[in-house]
Amino acid sequence: MQIVVEDLAKTFRIAERARGLWGAMRGLVRRRSRIVSALDGVSFSLAAGELVGYIGPNGAGKSTTIKILAGILVPDRGRVEVEGRVPWKQRIEHVRRIGVVFGQRTQLWWDLPVIESLEMLRHIYKVPADAFRAQRDELIALLDLGGLLDQPVRQLSLGQRMRADLAASLVHAPSILFLDEPTIGLDALSKLAVRAFVKRLNRERGVTVILTTHDMDDIEALCERVIVIGDGTILSDGTLVDLRNRVTRERWLTIDVADGSAETVGDPDATVIRRDGERVCLAFDPEVISPAQLIQRVTSRHAVRDLFVENPPIETVIARMYER
Amino acid sequence: MSGYLAIVAARFRSLLQYRAAALSGLFTQTFFGLVRIMILRAFYAASATAAAPMALPHVTGYVWLGQATLLLIPWRGDEDVTEQIRTGNVVYELTRPLDLYGLWFARALAWRTAPVMLRMLPMFVLAMLVIPIFVPEWGLAPPPSLAAFVLWLPCFAGAVLISAALTTLMSVTLMWTVSGDGVPILIASCATMFGGLVIPLPLFPDWAQPMLYALPFAGMLDLPSRLFTGDIAVANAPWILAHQLAWTIALVALGRALLRRGVRRLVVQGG
Protein backbone atom coordinates (compact mmCIF):
# COMPACT_ATOMS: atom_id res chain seq x y z
CA MET A 1 0.00 0.00 0.00
CA GLN A 2 1.30 3.38 -0.99
CA ILE A 3 -0.71 5.37 1.53
CA VAL A 4 -1.80 4.03 4.88
CA VAL A 5 -3.93 6.03 7.28
CA GLU A 6 -4.88 4.54 10.62
CA ASP A 7 -7.09 5.98 13.33
CA LEU A 8 -6.29 9.56 12.39
CA ALA A 9 -7.64 12.24 14.73
CA LYS A 10 -7.27 15.98 14.84
CA THR A 11 -8.96 18.58 16.99
CA PHE A 12 -8.87 22.32 16.68
CA ARG A 13 -9.26 24.84 19.45
CA ILE A 14 -11.68 27.52 18.38
CA ALA A 15 -11.57 30.76 20.35
CA GLU A 16 -14.99 31.92 21.33
CA ARG A 17 -16.20 35.29 22.38
CA ALA A 18 -19.44 36.20 23.99
CA ARG A 19 -21.54 38.51 21.85
CA GLY A 20 -21.53 42.28 21.99
CA LEU A 21 -19.28 44.86 23.55
CA TRP A 22 -19.45 43.33 27.00
CA GLY A 23 -18.43 40.01 25.53
CA ALA A 24 -15.48 41.60 23.78
CA MET A 25 -14.37 43.23 27.04
CA ARG A 26 -14.67 40.01 28.95
CA GLY A 27 -12.68 38.31 26.21
CA LEU A 28 -9.75 40.57 27.05
CA VAL A 29 -9.57 39.10 30.53
CA ARG A 30 -10.71 35.56 30.13
CA ARG A 31 -10.44 33.57 26.95
CA ARG A 32 -12.90 30.83 26.28
CA SER A 33 -12.34 28.20 23.72
CA ARG A 34 -14.11 25.20 22.38
CA ILE A 35 -12.51 22.04 21.08
CA VAL A 36 -13.77 21.05 17.66
CA SER A 37 -13.03 17.60 16.43
CA ALA A 38 -12.19 17.71 12.71
CA LEU A 39 -11.15 14.08 12.37
CA ASP A 40 -12.07 11.31 14.73
CA GLY A 41 -10.54 7.97 13.89
CA VAL A 42 -10.18 7.95 10.12
CA SER A 43 -8.57 4.90 8.51
CA PHE A 44 -8.07 3.92 4.88
CA SER A 45 -5.34 2.78 2.59
CA LEU A 46 -4.53 3.36 -1.05
CA ALA A 47 -2.59 1.36 -3.58
CA ALA A 48 -0.30 3.05 -6.08
CA GLY A 49 -2.16 4.25 -9.17
CA GLU A 50 -5.57 4.61 -7.56
CA LEU A 51 -7.81 7.56 -8.27
CA VAL A 52 -9.94 8.14 -5.21
CA GLY A 53 -12.70 10.63 -4.59
CA TYR A 54 -12.85 11.93 -1.03
CA ILE A 55 -16.16 13.60 -0.43
CA GLY A 56 -18.20 15.01 2.38
CA PRO A 57 -20.10 18.13 3.39
CA ASN A 58 -18.34 21.34 4.41
CA GLY A 59 -16.50 20.88 7.67
CA ALA A 60 -16.47 17.09 7.40
CA GLY A 61 -12.69 16.89 7.59
CA LYS A 62 -11.75 16.45 3.93
CA SER A 63 -9.26 19.27 3.76
CA THR A 64 -7.86 18.43 7.16
CA THR A 65 -7.08 14.91 5.97
CA ILE A 66 -5.42 16.21 2.81
CA LYS A 67 -3.39 18.70 4.81
CA ILE A 68 -2.17 16.00 7.17
CA LEU A 69 -1.27 13.74 4.26
CA ALA A 70 0.59 16.64 2.65
CA GLY A 71 2.65 17.24 5.80
CA ILE A 72 1.08 20.63 6.56
CA LEU A 73 -0.86 19.78 9.71
CA VAL A 74 0.18 17.63 12.62
CA PRO A 75 -2.52 15.20 13.81
CA ASP A 76 -3.34 14.58 17.48
CA ARG A 77 -3.15 10.86 17.11
CA GLY A 78 -3.07 8.17 14.47
CA ARG A 79 -0.58 6.72 12.04
CA VAL A 80 0.07 7.90 8.51
CA GLU A 81 2.59 6.46 6.12
CA VAL A 82 2.98 7.65 2.58
CA GLU A 83 5.48 5.51 0.69
CA GLY A 84 6.92 4.74 4.10
CA ARG A 85 7.23 8.38 5.14
CA VAL A 86 5.46 10.06 8.03
CA PRO A 87 4.44 13.33 6.37
CA TRP A 88 4.70 15.71 9.33
CA LYS A 89 7.92 14.20 10.62
CA GLN A 90 9.77 14.01 7.32
CA ARG A 91 8.03 16.97 5.76
CA ILE A 92 10.80 18.18 3.47
CA GLU A 93 11.63 14.75 2.12
CA HIS A 94 7.92 14.00 1.81
CA VAL A 95 6.81 17.07 -0.12
CA ARG A 96 9.56 16.54 -2.68
CA ARG A 97 7.58 13.55 -3.94
CA ILE A 98 4.01 14.80 -3.80
CA GLY A 99 2.05 17.41 -5.71
CA VAL A 100 -0.67 19.49 -4.08
CA VAL A 101 -3.36 21.74 -5.49
CA PHE A 102 -5.75 23.70 -3.30
CA GLY A 103 -8.52 24.89 -5.60
CA GLN A 104 -9.26 27.97 -3.52
CA ARG A 105 -5.68 29.20 -3.48
CA THR A 106 -2.87 29.53 -5.94
CA GLN A 107 0.71 28.43 -5.67
CA LEU A 108 1.81 30.65 -8.53
CA TRP A 109 3.58 33.94 -8.00
CA TRP A 110 0.90 36.54 -8.49
CA ASP A 111 3.05 39.13 -10.27
CA LEU A 112 5.20 36.77 -12.32
CA PRO A 113 4.38 35.29 -15.73
CA VAL A 114 3.31 31.66 -15.51
CA ILE A 115 6.51 30.38 -17.06
CA GLU A 116 8.61 32.15 -14.43
CA SER A 117 6.61 30.53 -11.65
CA LEU A 118 7.33 27.16 -13.23
CA GLU A 119 11.03 28.08 -13.43
CA MET A 120 11.00 29.05 -9.74
CA LEU A 121 9.50 25.71 -8.83
CA ARG A 122 12.15 23.98 -10.90
CA HIS A 123 14.81 25.58 -8.69
CA ILE A 124 12.89 24.91 -5.49
CA TYR A 125 12.48 21.22 -6.33
CA LYS A 126 15.95 21.02 -7.92
CA VAL A 127 14.64 19.44 -11.13
CA PRO A 128 17.45 18.85 -13.65
CA ALA A 129 17.20 21.18 -16.66
CA ASP A 130 16.49 18.53 -19.31
CA ALA A 131 13.94 16.66 -17.19
CA PHE A 132 12.25 19.98 -16.50
CA ARG A 133 12.14 20.89 -20.19
CA ALA A 134 10.49 17.60 -21.14
CA GLN A 135 8.00 17.82 -18.28
CA ARG A 136 7.22 21.45 -18.98
CA ASP A 137 6.58 20.90 -22.69
CA GLU A 138 4.33 17.95 -21.98
CA LEU A 139 2.32 19.83 -19.37
CA ILE A 140 1.99 22.83 -21.67
CA ALA A 141 0.64 20.60 -24.43
CA LEU A 142 -1.71 18.59 -22.19
CA LEU A 143 -3.11 21.60 -20.35
CA ASP A 144 -3.13 23.88 -23.38
CA LEU A 145 -1.03 26.50 -21.63
CA GLY A 146 0.90 27.72 -24.67
CA GLY A 147 -0.90 31.04 -24.92
CA LEU A 148 -0.78 31.79 -21.20
CA LEU A 149 2.89 31.32 -20.39
CA ASP A 150 3.90 34.95 -20.62
CA GLN A 151 0.89 36.37 -18.79
CA PRO A 152 1.19 37.39 -15.17
CA VAL A 153 -0.95 35.13 -13.00
CA ARG A 154 -3.15 37.98 -11.81
CA GLN A 155 -4.43 38.39 -15.38
CA LEU A 156 -5.56 34.79 -15.79
CA SER A 157 -9.17 33.69 -15.56
CA LEU A 158 -9.99 31.14 -12.85
CA GLY A 159 -10.07 28.28 -15.36
CA GLN A 160 -6.74 29.29 -16.86
CA ARG A 161 -5.24 29.72 -13.42
CA MET A 162 -6.35 26.28 -12.34
CA ARG A 163 -4.71 24.70 -15.38
CA ALA A 164 -1.52 26.61 -14.61
CA ASP A 165 -1.76 25.55 -10.95
CA LEU A 166 -2.06 21.92 -12.01
CA ALA A 167 1.06 22.30 -14.13
CA ALA A 168 2.84 23.92 -11.17
CA SER A 169 2.00 21.00 -8.91
CA LEU A 170 3.59 18.56 -11.36
CA VAL A 171 6.86 20.27 -12.28
CA HIS A 172 8.78 17.77 -10.13
CA ALA A 173 6.88 14.76 -11.51
CA PRO A 174 5.43 13.57 -8.19
CA SER A 175 4.02 10.06 -7.85
CA ILE A 176 1.09 11.23 -5.73
CA LEU A 177 -1.17 14.18 -6.36
CA PHE A 178 -3.52 15.70 -3.78
CA LEU A 179 -6.30 17.78 -5.30
CA ASP A 180 -8.40 19.76 -2.85
CA GLU A 181 -11.48 21.00 -4.71
CA PRO A 182 -9.71 21.49 -8.04
CA THR A 183 -12.91 22.34 -9.93
CA ILE A 184 -14.39 24.80 -7.46
CA GLY A 185 -15.84 27.83 -9.22
CA LEU A 186 -14.85 26.66 -12.71
CA ASP A 187 -17.13 26.84 -15.74
CA ALA A 188 -18.30 23.63 -17.43
CA LEU A 189 -15.60 23.69 -20.10
CA SER A 190 -12.76 24.24 -17.64
CA LYS A 191 -14.12 21.47 -15.44
CA LEU A 192 -14.02 19.10 -18.40
CA ALA A 193 -10.44 20.11 -19.19
CA VAL A 194 -9.34 19.53 -15.59
CA ARG A 195 -11.11 16.16 -15.43
CA ALA A 196 -9.66 14.98 -18.73
CA PHE A 197 -6.20 15.94 -17.58
CA VAL A 198 -6.47 14.26 -14.19
CA LYS A 199 -7.77 11.12 -15.83
CA ARG A 200 -4.89 10.98 -18.30
CA LEU A 201 -2.37 11.63 -15.59
CA ASN A 202 -3.74 8.72 -13.62
CA ARG A 203 -4.14 6.31 -16.54
CA GLU A 204 -1.02 7.06 -18.50
CA ARG A 205 1.48 7.90 -15.82
CA GLY A 206 0.04 5.92 -12.97
CA VAL A 207 0.00 8.93 -10.65
CA THR A 208 -2.03 8.23 -7.52
CA VAL A 209 -4.68 10.91 -7.11
CA ILE A 210 -6.79 11.84 -4.10
CA LEU A 211 -9.46 14.30 -5.01
CA THR A 212 -11.83 16.18 -2.75
CA THR A 213 -14.81 17.84 -4.35
CA HIS A 214 -18.38 18.96 -3.96
CA ASP A 215 -19.06 18.35 -7.62
CA MET A 216 -20.50 14.88 -7.99
CA ASP A 217 -19.86 15.00 -11.74
CA ASP A 218 -16.15 15.02 -10.90
CA ILE A 219 -16.65 11.83 -8.94
CA GLU A 220 -18.76 10.15 -11.58
CA ALA A 221 -16.36 11.12 -14.35
CA LEU A 222 -13.16 10.17 -12.55
CA CYS A 223 -13.30 7.95 -9.52
CA GLU A 224 -13.70 4.22 -9.30
CA ARG A 225 -13.46 4.46 -5.57
CA VAL A 226 -15.20 6.94 -3.30
CA ILE A 227 -14.55 7.58 0.36
CA VAL A 228 -17.35 9.48 2.07
CA ILE A 229 -16.56 11.32 5.28
CA GLY A 230 -18.93 13.08 7.64
CA ASP A 231 -18.32 14.57 11.09
CA GLY A 232 -14.75 13.35 11.07
CA THR A 233 -15.46 9.68 10.48
CA ILE A 234 -15.63 7.58 7.36
CA LEU A 235 -19.21 6.79 6.37
CA SER A 236 -18.49 4.69 3.32
CA ASP A 237 -15.52 3.45 1.31
CA GLY A 238 -15.94 1.59 -1.96
CA THR A 239 -16.94 1.85 -5.61
CA LEU A 240 -19.65 4.22 -6.77
CA VAL A 241 -21.93 1.24 -7.47
CA ASP A 242 -21.37 -0.09 -3.94
CA LEU A 243 -22.14 3.29 -2.51
CA ARG A 244 -25.43 3.48 -4.38
CA ASN A 245 -26.42 -0.03 -3.40
CA ARG A 246 -25.57 0.49 0.22
CA VAL A 247 -27.53 3.69 0.60
CA THR A 248 -30.50 3.12 -1.64
CA ARG A 249 -31.67 0.74 -4.33
CA GLU A 250 -34.04 3.40 -5.54
CA ARG A 251 -34.45 4.11 -9.27
CA TRP A 252 -36.25 6.94 -10.93
CA LEU A 253 -38.75 6.67 -13.80
CA THR A 254 -39.37 9.92 -15.60
CA ILE A 255 -42.25 10.12 -18.05
CA ASP A 256 -43.61 12.83 -20.33
CA VAL A 257 -47.35 12.42 -20.86
CA ALA A 258 -49.03 13.51 -24.09
CA ASP A 259 -52.68 13.66 -23.04
CA GLY A 260 -52.58 16.25 -20.28
CA SER A 261 -53.17 13.65 -17.55
CA ALA A 262 -49.93 14.38 -15.69
CA GLU A 263 -51.87 15.25 -12.53
CA THR A 264 -53.26 11.74 -12.23
CA VAL A 265 -50.05 9.76 -12.85
CA GLY A 266 -49.25 7.52 -9.91
CA ASP A 267 -48.82 3.94 -8.79
CA PRO A 268 -49.26 2.14 -5.47
CA ASP A 269 -45.68 0.73 -5.68
CA ALA A 270 -43.97 4.02 -6.54
CA THR A 271 -43.86 7.51 -5.07
CA VAL A 272 -44.13 10.69 -7.06
CA ILE A 273 -41.12 12.82 -6.26
CA ARG A 274 -41.72 15.60 -8.77
CA ARG A 275 -44.41 16.93 -11.12
CA ASP A 276 -43.29 19.54 -13.59
CA GLY A 277 -45.92 20.34 -16.26
CA GLU A 278 -46.15 17.31 -18.51
CA ARG A 279 -43.24 15.60 -16.78
CA VAL A 280 -43.60 13.31 -13.78
CA CYS A 281 -40.82 11.59 -11.89
CA LEU A 282 -41.56 8.40 -9.95
CA ALA A 283 -39.21 6.74 -7.49
CA PHE A 284 -39.43 2.98 -7.08
CA ASP A 285 -37.60 0.04 -5.60
CA PRO A 286 -36.73 -2.55 -8.29
CA GLU A 287 -37.01 -5.32 -5.69
CA VAL A 288 -40.67 -4.42 -5.15
CA ILE A 289 -41.63 -3.72 -8.73
CA SER A 290 -39.47 -4.28 -11.79
CA PRO A 291 -38.95 -1.34 -14.16
CA ALA A 292 -40.69 -3.25 -16.95
CA GLN A 293 -43.79 -3.84 -14.82
CA LEU A 294 -44.00 -0.25 -13.70
CA ILE A 295 -43.59 1.05 -17.26
CA GLN A 296 -46.29 -1.32 -18.45
CA ARG A 297 -48.71 -0.18 -15.77
CA VAL A 298 -48.12 3.49 -16.42
CA THR A 299 -48.25 3.25 -20.23
CA SER A 300 -51.50 1.28 -20.06
CA ARG A 301 -53.20 4.16 -18.25
CA HIS A 302 -51.61 7.21 -19.90
CA ALA A 303 -50.50 8.29 -23.35
CA VAL A 304 -46.75 8.54 -22.83
CA ARG A 305 -44.62 10.52 -25.26
CA ASP A 306 -41.24 9.70 -23.73
CA LEU A 307 -39.81 7.94 -20.71
CA PHE A 308 -36.50 6.98 -19.15
CA VAL A 309 -35.21 5.15 -16.10
CA GLU A 310 -32.17 6.47 -14.23
CA ASN A 311 -30.27 6.21 -10.99
CA PRO A 312 -30.86 9.05 -8.58
CA PRO A 313 -28.07 11.64 -8.93
CA ILE A 314 -25.17 10.87 -6.65
CA GLU A 315 -25.86 14.11 -4.76
CA THR A 316 -29.15 12.64 -3.64
CA VAL A 317 -27.48 9.41 -2.62
CA ILE A 318 -24.90 11.26 -0.57
CA ALA A 319 -27.51 13.54 0.95
CA ARG A 320 -29.46 10.47 2.11
CA MET A 321 -26.32 9.09 3.64
CA TYR A 322 -25.69 12.27 5.63
CA GLU A 323 -29.30 12.25 6.81
CA ARG A 324 -28.86 8.92 8.49
CA MET B 1 20.61 27.90 -8.12
CA SER B 2 19.07 26.81 -4.86
CA GLY B 3 15.41 27.26 -4.06
CA TYR B 4 16.06 29.97 -1.48
CA LEU B 5 18.20 31.90 -3.92
CA ALA B 6 15.55 31.62 -6.65
CA ILE B 7 12.98 33.08 -4.27
CA VAL B 8 15.26 35.90 -3.17
CA ALA B 9 16.11 36.70 -6.78
CA ALA B 10 12.46 36.77 -7.87
CA ARG B 11 11.53 38.91 -4.89
CA PHE B 12 14.39 41.24 -5.58
CA ARG B 13 13.37 41.61 -9.20
CA SER B 14 9.79 42.41 -8.38
CA LEU B 15 10.77 44.86 -5.60
CA LEU B 16 13.14 46.68 -7.89
CA GLN B 17 10.14 47.58 -10.03
CA TYR B 18 9.05 50.14 -7.47
CA ARG B 19 11.18 52.93 -8.85
CA ALA B 20 8.61 55.67 -8.30
CA ALA B 21 8.39 54.72 -4.62
CA ALA B 22 12.17 54.86 -4.39
CA LEU B 23 12.25 58.29 -5.98
CA SER B 24 9.64 59.76 -3.68
CA GLY B 25 11.33 58.02 -0.76
CA LEU B 26 14.60 59.63 -1.75
CA PHE B 27 12.93 63.03 -1.76
CA THR B 28 11.29 62.68 1.67
CA GLN B 29 14.35 61.10 3.22
CA THR B 30 16.51 63.97 1.99
CA PHE B 31 14.02 66.49 3.33
CA PHE B 32 13.81 64.83 6.75
CA GLY B 33 17.59 64.44 6.79
CA LEU B 34 17.97 68.17 6.37
CA VAL B 35 15.37 68.85 9.07
CA ARG B 36 17.06 66.49 11.53
CA ILE B 37 20.45 68.08 10.86
CA MET B 38 18.95 71.52 11.33
CA ILE B 39 17.52 70.54 14.72
CA LEU B 40 20.71 68.84 15.89
CA ARG B 41 22.81 71.82 14.78
CA ALA B 42 20.51 74.08 16.77
CA PHE B 43 20.97 71.86 19.84
CA TYR B 44 24.70 71.92 19.43
CA ALA B 45 24.75 75.70 18.94
CA ALA B 46 22.58 76.23 22.03
CA SER B 47 24.45 73.98 24.43
CA ALA B 48 27.88 74.70 22.93
CA THR B 49 29.86 72.54 25.30
CA ALA B 50 33.12 71.12 24.21
CA ALA B 51 32.22 67.87 25.91
CA ALA B 52 29.49 66.83 23.44
CA PRO B 53 29.50 63.03 23.30
CA MET B 54 29.67 63.13 19.50
CA ALA B 55 31.35 65.67 17.20
CA LEU B 56 29.01 67.65 14.97
CA PRO B 57 30.35 66.30 11.63
CA HIS B 58 29.92 62.78 13.02
CA VAL B 59 26.33 63.56 13.99
CA THR B 60 25.68 64.95 10.51
CA GLY B 61 27.12 61.85 8.86
CA TYR B 62 25.15 59.67 11.28
CA VAL B 63 21.91 61.33 10.21
CA TRP B 64 22.63 60.88 6.50
CA LEU B 65 23.62 57.24 6.88
CA GLY B 66 20.49 56.72 8.93
CA GLN B 67 18.38 58.28 6.18
CA ALA B 68 20.13 56.23 3.48
CA THR B 69 19.54 52.91 5.26
CA LEU B 70 16.24 53.93 6.84
CA LEU B 71 14.31 51.02 5.35
CA LEU B 72 16.57 48.58 7.14
CA ILE B 73 14.51 49.34 10.23
CA PRO B 74 11.95 46.52 10.53
CA TRP B 75 8.75 48.56 10.41
CA ARG B 76 6.59 45.50 10.11
CA GLY B 77 6.62 41.83 9.23
CA ASP B 78 7.18 40.66 5.71
CA GLU B 79 4.21 41.76 3.59
CA ASP B 80 4.03 38.51 1.61
CA VAL B 81 4.26 36.25 4.64
CA THR B 82 1.72 38.38 6.54
CA GLU B 83 -0.69 38.04 3.65
CA GLN B 84 -0.05 34.31 3.40
CA ILE B 85 -0.79 33.76 7.06
CA ARG B 86 -3.89 35.94 6.89
CA THR B 87 -5.33 34.14 3.87
CA GLY B 88 -4.07 30.67 4.68
CA ASN B 89 -1.89 30.49 1.57
CA VAL B 90 0.89 29.58 3.96
CA VAL B 91 -0.16 25.97 3.27
CA TYR B 92 1.69 26.12 -0.02
CA GLU B 93 4.85 27.28 1.75
CA LEU B 94 4.70 24.11 3.78
CA THR B 95 4.42 21.94 0.68
CA ARG B 96 7.82 23.11 -0.55
CA PRO B 97 10.89 21.02 0.17
CA LEU B 98 12.44 23.94 2.01
CA ASP B 99 12.94 24.81 5.63
CA LEU B 100 10.14 27.26 6.47
CA TYR B 101 12.29 29.51 8.64
CA GLY B 102 14.98 29.60 5.97
CA LEU B 103 12.37 30.43 3.38
CA TRP B 104 10.93 33.30 5.42
CA PHE B 105 14.37 34.57 6.33
CA ALA B 106 15.34 34.56 2.65
CA ARG B 107 12.20 36.49 1.79
CA ALA B 108 12.83 38.98 4.60
CA LEU B 109 16.37 39.46 3.38
CA ALA B 110 15.16 40.44 -0.08
CA TRP B 111 12.28 42.48 1.34
CA ARG B 112 14.66 44.52 3.52
CA THR B 113 17.59 44.94 1.16
CA ALA B 114 16.00 45.61 -2.23
CA PRO B 115 14.43 48.97 -1.28
CA VAL B 116 17.54 49.99 0.69
CA MET B 117 19.76 49.20 -2.28
CA LEU B 118 17.55 51.28 -4.55
CA ARG B 119 17.75 54.31 -2.30
CA MET B 120 21.17 54.07 -0.74
CA LEU B 121 23.29 54.90 -3.75
CA PRO B 122 21.39 58.04 -4.85
CA MET B 123 21.25 59.12 -1.20
CA PHE B 124 25.00 58.77 -0.88
CA VAL B 125 25.54 60.80 -4.04
CA LEU B 126 23.19 63.51 -2.77
CA ALA B 127 24.59 63.69 0.74
CA MET B 128 28.24 63.36 -0.20
CA LEU B 129 28.45 65.34 -3.43
CA VAL B 130 25.41 67.54 -4.02
CA ILE B 131 24.49 68.93 -0.60
CA PRO B 132 28.07 70.07 0.27
CA ILE B 133 27.97 72.27 -2.85
CA PHE B 134 25.24 74.36 -1.25
CA VAL B 135 25.89 73.98 2.49
CA PRO B 136 29.40 72.58 2.93
CA GLU B 137 29.08 71.47 6.55
CA TRP B 138 25.74 69.75 6.10
CA GLY B 139 26.98 66.94 3.89
CA LEU B 140 28.12 63.40 4.56
CA ALA B 141 31.89 63.32 4.91
CA PRO B 142 33.71 60.30 3.45
CA PRO B 143 35.01 57.76 5.97
CA PRO B 144 38.21 58.85 7.74
CA SER B 145 40.20 55.98 6.26
CA LEU B 146 39.95 53.28 3.65
CA ALA B 147 40.00 50.74 6.49
CA ALA B 148 36.92 52.36 8.03
CA PHE B 149 35.08 52.03 4.74
CA VAL B 150 36.19 48.45 4.09
CA LEU B 151 35.18 47.40 7.62
CA TRP B 152 31.89 49.24 7.29
CA LEU B 153 30.85 46.83 4.51
CA PRO B 154 30.65 43.67 6.67
CA CYS B 155 29.05 45.75 9.44
CA PHE B 156 26.39 46.83 6.97
CA ALA B 157 25.84 43.17 6.05
CA GLY B 158 25.55 42.41 9.77
CA ALA B 159 22.93 45.15 10.08
CA VAL B 160 20.99 43.54 7.23
CA LEU B 161 21.10 40.17 9.02
CA ILE B 162 19.75 41.59 12.31
CA SER B 163 17.06 43.41 10.39
CA ALA B 164 16.02 40.26 8.49
CA ALA B 165 16.02 38.21 11.70
CA LEU B 166 13.78 40.78 13.42
CA THR B 167 11.49 40.90 10.39
CA THR B 168 11.17 37.12 10.37
CA LEU B 169 10.45 37.16 14.10
CA MET B 170 7.64 39.63 13.43
CA SER B 171 6.23 37.35 10.74
CA VAL B 172 6.42 34.33 13.02
CA THR B 173 4.45 36.07 15.79
CA LEU B 174 1.55 36.37 13.34
CA MET B 175 0.96 32.67 13.80
CA TRP B 176 -0.32 33.47 17.28
CA THR B 177 -2.33 36.59 16.69
CA VAL B 178 -4.80 36.47 13.84
CA SER B 179 -4.83 40.10 12.79
CA GLY B 180 -2.01 40.88 15.16
CA ASP B 181 -0.02 43.93 14.36
CA GLY B 182 0.71 44.15 18.09
CA VAL B 183 4.11 42.53 18.36
CA PRO B 184 5.40 43.98 15.06
CA ILE B 185 4.38 47.50 16.14
CA LEU B 186 6.10 46.99 19.49
CA ILE B 187 9.30 45.83 17.80
CA ALA B 188 9.11 48.65 15.26
CA SER B 189 8.74 51.35 17.94
CA CYS B 190 11.67 49.93 19.87
CA ALA B 191 13.73 49.75 16.69
CA THR B 192 12.99 53.38 15.86
CA MET B 193 13.71 54.75 19.35
CA PHE B 194 16.55 52.48 20.41
CA GLY B 195 18.01 52.23 16.91
CA GLY B 196 19.10 55.86 16.87
CA LEU B 197 16.55 57.06 14.36
CA VAL B 198 15.06 59.73 16.63
CA ILE B 199 18.15 60.81 18.55
CA PRO B 200 21.62 59.42 17.86
CA LEU B 201 22.30 56.86 20.59
CA PRO B 202 25.45 58.57 21.95
CA LEU B 203 23.32 61.62 22.81
CA PHE B 204 21.15 59.57 25.20
CA PRO B 205 22.00 59.97 28.94
CA ASP B 206 25.04 58.07 30.20
CA TRP B 207 22.98 55.71 32.35
CA ALA B 208 21.05 54.54 29.27
CA GLN B 209 24.14 53.75 27.22
CA PRO B 210 24.83 50.19 28.44
CA MET B 211 21.23 49.20 27.87
CA LEU B 212 21.04 50.80 24.42
CA TYR B 213 24.14 49.01 23.23
CA ALA B 214 23.12 45.69 24.72
CA LEU B 215 19.95 45.72 22.62
CA PRO B 216 19.97 44.40 19.03
CA PHE B 217 18.64 47.66 17.60
CA ALA B 218 21.98 49.47 17.91
CA GLY B 219 23.45 47.04 15.42
CA MET B 220 21.25 48.18 12.56
CA LEU B 221 21.91 51.90 12.04
CA ASP B 222 23.92 53.18 14.95
CA LEU B 223 27.04 51.05 15.13
CA PRO B 224 27.76 50.77 11.38
CA SER B 225 27.14 54.52 10.91
CA ARG B 226 29.50 55.47 13.72
CA LEU B 227 32.19 53.27 12.21
CA PHE B 228 31.66 54.95 8.84
CA THR B 229 31.91 58.49 10.23
CA GLY B 230 34.92 57.70 12.39
CA ASP B 231 33.08 58.14 15.68
CA ILE B 232 34.05 54.56 16.46
CA ALA B 233 37.69 53.68 15.87
CA VAL B 234 38.54 51.08 13.26
CA ALA B 235 40.10 48.93 15.98
CA ASN B 236 36.67 48.46 17.56
CA ALA B 237 35.05 47.10 14.39
CA PRO B 238 35.32 43.47 15.53
CA TRP B 239 33.15 44.36 18.55
CA ILE B 240 30.46 45.67 16.25
CA LEU B 241 30.55 42.48 14.21
CA ALA B 242 30.48 40.37 17.36
CA HIS B 243 27.43 42.30 18.63
CA GLN B 244 25.62 41.82 15.32
CA LEU B 245 26.53 38.17 14.99
CA ALA B 246 25.51 37.33 18.55
CA TRP B 247 22.16 39.04 18.13
CA THR B 248 21.53 37.48 14.74
CA ILE B 249 22.17 34.03 16.18
CA ALA B 250 19.94 34.73 19.18
CA LEU B 251 17.10 36.15 17.08
CA VAL B 252 17.27 33.32 14.56
CA ALA B 253 17.22 30.76 17.37
CA LEU B 254 14.21 32.47 18.97
CA GLY B 255 12.39 32.74 15.63
CA ARG B 256 13.06 29.09 14.82
CA ALA B 257 11.82 27.89 18.19
CA LEU B 258 8.65 29.97 17.92
CA LEU B 259 8.03 28.82 14.36
CA ARG B 260 8.45 25.18 15.32
CA ARG B 261 5.78 25.59 17.98
CA GLY B 262 3.64 27.67 15.64
CA VAL B 263 3.58 25.02 12.93
CA ARG B 264 2.45 22.40 15.43
CA ARG B 265 -0.57 24.45 16.40
CA LEU B 266 -1.28 25.66 12.90
CA VAL B 267 -4.94 26.04 12.07
CA VAL B 268 -5.74 26.66 8.45
CA GLN B 269 -8.80 28.82 8.23
CA GLY B 270 -11.41 28.59 5.56
CA GLY B 271 -10.89 25.05 4.39
Image: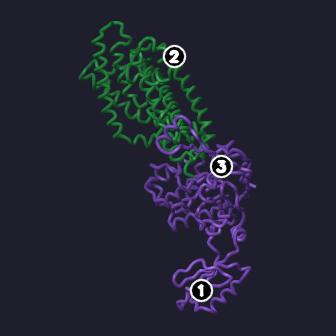
Chain colours: A purple, B green
Q: Position of residue A316 (x, y in %)?
A: 62, 69
Residue beneath the point at 74% across and 53% down: A4
Nearer the N terminus, badge 1 or badge 3? 3
Residue beneath the point at 54% across and 19% down: B242
Mark 2 lies on residue: B239
Q: Position of residue B239 (x, y in %)?
A: 51, 16
Q: In the rendered structure, find residue A33 and report the number of the disc placed on it.
A: none
Distance between the alpha carbons at the discs numbered 2 and 3: 53 Å
Q: Nearer the viewer, mark 2 or mark 3?
A: 3
Distance between the alpha carbons at the discs numbered 1 and 2: 95 Å
**Callout 2: helix, strand or loop?**
helix
In this rendering, position of residue A108 left or right of residue A224: left
Q: Is residue B182 visible?
A: yes
Name above or below for residue A20 compared with residue A158. above
Pointers 1 and 3 in contact (C-beta within 8 Å): no
Q: Chain of mark 1?
A: A
Using the rendered image, report if marks 2 and 3 lie on a common chain: no
Q: Chain of mark 3?
A: A
Using the rendered image, report if marks 1 and 2 lie on a common chain: no
Residue beneath the point at 72% across and 46% down: A85
Mark 1 lies on residue: A265
Name above or below for residue A295 compared with residue A220. below
Q: Quadrant of the C terminus of chain A?
A: bottom right
Using the rendered image, report if marks 1 and 3 lie on a common chain: yes
Q: Position of residue A249 (x, y in %)?
A: 70, 74
The total of numbered circles placed on residues is 3
Mark 3 lies on residue: A37
Q: Amino acid at mark 1?
A: Val
